[in-house]
């Protein structure tokens, strides 16, 4: 009888333990699993984008997040395929930096139907239903364009004999949020002074090589009529600097150069006297993304729009600020 009682007692304890495991709260069970995020990156077209990728991968590792990373190579169709793959893999959160603004409704509806929350980083989308994504983390691109325009209005040193300021513009990828918004903000500000005119504007696709190529075409068409170059990112500006020097002109002196991003390459160009100002656009979004993703999965309320804090760095302070740059 003693043995029977012991056996019954052990069976009872075992049954209770199994019951406890089976009836554990879903939250407890979920908390034990690492968060899985599917992230689709635009590509690796610039210093900024490379720093952004590093920030996201490093932050995921530090947070213990399982990151499924896909490089779209600047093609929207690749991002759509990646998002559908993340849906099929049943990740906890989908995050992506969209190549262009439009054309996302269908695939985002698929994510919503699968009950997978979507977070936008760096770039926004234009959709018919903004419930298709939870939040957008990134810069205010329109304000960046305004800051570039305000700096130029206050500091323009070069002008044509008639007093006009002739500007050539290197736009980012056609249809992308930063290209659209940086152009809009800049034009909004310079419209206050009719002497400031954009005489040429063309995409440089956010790349150094294309920036050089397009600037060469601008110089052939307009020559010394160009007083200012406004580039939507630093990489295009750096490419354009090469073209200006090859044309026998002095970048930063013969042509005032205004760009956006604030990467180390831009600071080096400013220290060398070849770039006049860069408007900051921080790529270090990784830690913020990991925290917001965790909050979303935990059903905590998050703002629809989360704006990063950034500054303006003219050449005069480049040498002092350079040691502080992280990208």
Image (cartoon, rainbow, N blue to C red):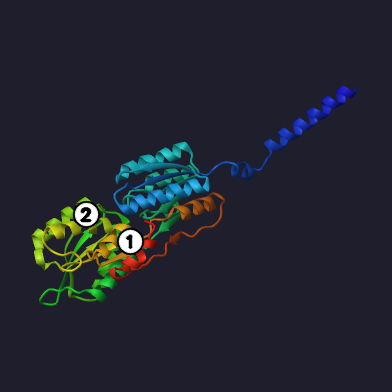
Q: Name the quadrant of the C terminus.
A: bottom left
Label 1 to label 2: alpha-carbon separation? 18 Å
28 lies above or below 282:
above
Residue at 43% from the left image edge and 57% from the top image edge: 137
- The percent coordinates of residue 60 (x first, y second) are 48, 47
Select label 1 or label 2 by which is in front. Answer: 1
- Decide which of tag 1 and tag 2 comes sooner along the chain: 2
The answer to which of 105 and 155 lies nearer the viewer is 155
The 10 Å Cα crowd at callout 2, few under 14, some 14 to 19, many 20 or more, is many
On the question of residue 96 being in view, the answer is: no
Residue at 12% from the left image edge and 73% from the top image edge: 160
Q: Name the quadrant of the N terminus.
A: top right
Q: Which mark is drawn over residue 204?
A: 2
Q: Is residue 314 left or right of residue 159?
A: right
Residue beneath disc 1: 262
The answer to which of 9 and 192 lies nearer the viewer is 9
The local secondary structure at tag 1 comes to: loop
Quarter holding residue 81: top left
The local secondary structure at tag 2 comes to: loop
Q: Residue furthest right?
A: 1
- The percent coordinates of residue 169 (x first, y second) are 20, 62
Q: Are marks 1 and 2 in contact (CB under 8 Å)?
A: no
Q: Which mark is drawn over residue 99?
A: none
């Amino acid at each position: 009888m003693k043995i029977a009682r012991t056996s019954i007692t052990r069976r009872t304890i075992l049954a209770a333990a199994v019951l406890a495991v089976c009836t554990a709260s879903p939250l407890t069970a979920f908390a034990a699993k690492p968060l899985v995020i599917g992230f689709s990156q635009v590509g690796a077209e610039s210093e900024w984008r490379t720093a952004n990728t590093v920030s996201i991968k490093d932050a995921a590792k530090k947070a213990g997040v399982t990151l499924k990373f896909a490089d779209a190579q600047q093609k929207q169709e690749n991002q759509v395929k990646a998002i559908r793959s993340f849906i099929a893999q049943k990740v906890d959160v989908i995050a992506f930096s969209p190549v262009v603004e439009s054309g996302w409704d269908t695939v985002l509806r698929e994510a919503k139907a699968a009950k997978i929350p979507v977070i936008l980083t760096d770039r926004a989308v234009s959709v018919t239903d903004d419930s298709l994504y939870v939040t957008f983390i990134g810069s205010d691109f329109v304000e960046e364009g305004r800051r570039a325009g305000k700096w130029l209005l206050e500091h323009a040193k070069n002008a044509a004999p008639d007093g006009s300021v002739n500007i050539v513009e290197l736009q980012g990828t056609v249809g992308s949020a930063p290209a659209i918004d940086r152009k809009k903000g800049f034009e909004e500000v310079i419209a206050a002074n009719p002497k400031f005119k954009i005489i040429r504007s063309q995409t440089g696709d956010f790349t150094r090589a294309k920036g050089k190529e397009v600037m060469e075409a601008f110089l052939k068409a307009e020559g010394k009529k160009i007083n200012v170059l406004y580039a939507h990112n630093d990489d295009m500006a750096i490419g354009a600097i090469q073209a200006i020097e090859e044309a026998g002109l002095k970048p930063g002196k013969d042509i005032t150069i205004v760009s956006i991003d604030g990467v180390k390459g831009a600071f080096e160009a400013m220290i060398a006297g070849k770039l006049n100002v860069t408007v900051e656009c921080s790529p270090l979004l990784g830690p913020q993304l990991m925290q917001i993703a965790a909050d979303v999965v935990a059903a905590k309320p998050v703002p629809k729009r989360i704006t990063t804090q950034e500054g303006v760095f003219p050449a005069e302070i480049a040498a002092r600020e350079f040691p502080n740059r992280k990208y």
